[in-house]
Image (tube, helix red, strand yellow):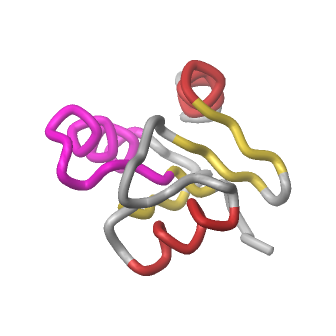
Amino acid sequence: MLDKPVIVFDGHCVLCSANARFVLRNDRYGHFRLAAMQGEVGAAILERCGVDPANPETLIVVDNETVLRDSDAVIAIWSNLGWP
């Protein structure tokens, strides 16, 4: 089990990497972990979720057994960043 929600993103995608940097800067409470899908951990998480790491289709947030994709993942990220 993962101790915190993990955002699995495409480390080769400029937009995805910019979003990851944004999360790192604004996650005041350390709610998320990040893993590039090209790395060992990110690839393992994607495979566990049934997504081929070599052919990613979406941003994924994994929170224990809950897997959020696409807009659901984005909403989960934005709603947990801890805005003032």
Locate the C terminus and report the quarter of the image it occupies.
Answer: top right
Q: Residue furthest right?
A: 65
Residue 52's x, y, as percent? 50, 57
At 33% from the left and 45% from the top, the residue drawn is 20
Locate the N terminus and report the quarter of the image it occupies.
Answer: bottom right
The answer to whether residue 81 is above or below residue 11 is: above
Q: Is residue 82 visible?
A: no
Residue 2's x, y, as percent? 73, 70
At 48% from the left and 44% from the top, the residue drawn is 27
At 48% from the left and 38% from the top, the residue drawn is 59
Left/right of residue 75 with respect to residue 26 in the rendered view: right
The answer to whether residue 56 is above or below residue 39 is: above
Q: Residue 11 falls in which quadrant of the image? A: bottom left
Is residue 22 inside the magenta stretch? yes
Q: Is residue 37 visible?
A: yes
Left/right of residue 10 with respect to residue 76 in the rendered view: left
Q: Dominant secondary structure of the magenta stretch?
A: helix
The magenta region covers 8-26
Residue placed most toward the observer, 84 or 25: 25
Residue placed most toward the observer, 62 or 27: 62
The answer to whether residue 39 is above or below residue 33 is: below
Residue placed most toward the observer, 63 or 80: 63
Residue 58's x, y, as percent? 47, 35
Left/right of residue 50 with respect to residue 32 in the rendered view: right
Total marks drawn? Answer: 0
Q: Residue 44 falls in which quadrant of the image? A: bottom right
Left/right of residue 82 with respect to residue 34 in the rendered view: right
Residue 35's x, y, as percent? 43, 63
At 69% from the left and 56% from the top, the residue drawn is 49
Q: Residue furthest bottom?
A: 40
Is residue 55 inside the magenta stretch? no
The answer to whether residue 57 is above or below residue 74 is: below
